[in-house]
Image: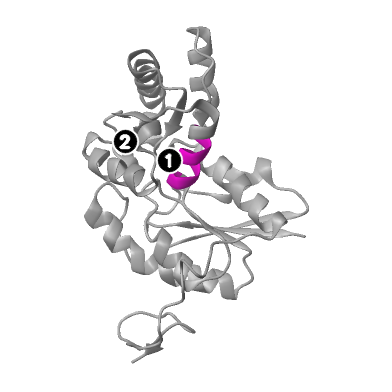
Amino acid sequence: MKSVIHIITPIITEGIRSLDDVQPFLRQDLEVRHSLIVNGPASIECSVDEALSIPGILEQAVAAERDGASALIIDCMGDPGLEACRELVSIPVLGPAQTCMHYASMLGHHFAFITVLDRLKPMIDGLVARYGLQANYAGFGAVDIPVLEIEQRLDELLEQLVAASLHSVESTRAGAIILGCTGFFGCAEAIAERLAAAGYAVPVLDPIPLTLHAADVLVKTGLSHSKYIYPAPRRKPLAGYALPGAYDTV
């Protein structure tokens, strides 16, 4: 069975995500597609940004399923629109935060979440509580580099990620590190090597590769989310959005 995984990057900024990023993971039986949202924020760094991104995510999710995708990934560690997407479509929908938190709990019991800005702590604390993983949550760290500055500050970013990860391991005994921004793509290996050199053989989870492989597993095993728990919305008139098959646009 061929997996067709569609990555929805829930911002309008071109170049933040490219299919080149996932090229090393592709196989003959694994195809990856990608789209941005058309209307919404340039990056997601607060609850307002997240809320503004969700209509576009829903539109992209419906379109991707209609175009033959077999699973969806929401390319943001806030998991915006995750539960709403699961109501709208029947194919698996994965949020990288939920995926990473559960894998990190399995691999290291206690995990630390290292992200871009300190202001995101309430959002991440809320996600941990929603996913029922408070007992596995060792702590939160931030590097104070906005999303749109990541590419220009990669060397500084890596040093700060290493320092925050090392601090989390030493101060909280975190057994796993979650890179809490999908824009940190490709940093995990270097961080894990630096931690190992300091005497800490701790897994560092890179959200997009892990979530991509998790989505592939769900497709290969024929599993998806429960439509008993995530039932489709009742049909009713809807103005201002295009969600064909789910609402009657007026």
Q: Is residue 39 left or right of residue 121?
A: right
Picture coordinates of residue 38 (x, y %)? 39, 67
Secondary structure mainly formed by the magenta segment: helix
Q: Nearer the viewer, residue 100 or 128?
A: 128
| Crowd class of label 1 (few under 14; some 14 to 19; many from 20; radius 10 Å) | many
Q: Which residue is mark 2?
A: 116
Picture coordinates of residue 158 (x, y %)? 41, 24
Q: Is residue 38 above or below residue 20?
A: below
Is residue 38 visible to us here?
Answer: no
Q: Which residue is mark 1?
A: 183
Q: Residue at x 35, y 64 (%)?
A: 54
> Disc 2 marks which amino acid?
Val
Q: Nearer the viewer, residue 167 or 9?
A: 167
Q: Residue at x 43, y 44 (%)?
A: 97
Residue 67 is one of the magenta-drawn residues: no
Picture coordinates of residue 111 (x, y %)? 42, 29
> Disc 1 marks which amino acid?
Gly
Q: Is residue 145 above or below residue 32?
A: above
Marks 1 and 2 in Cβ contact (< 8 Å):
yes
Secondary structure of the residue carrying numbered label 2: loop
Q: Residue at x 48, y 21 (%)?
A: 191
- Sequence-wise, the earlier of marks 1 and 2 is 2
Magenta-drawn segment = 97-104
Q: Nearer the viewer, residue 68 or 11?
A: 68
Picture coordinates of residue 96 (x, y %)? 47, 46
Distance between mark 1 and mark 2 Cα atoms: 9 Å
Q: Nearer the viewer, residue 4 or 81?
A: 81
Q: Residue at x 43, y 79 (%)?
A: 243
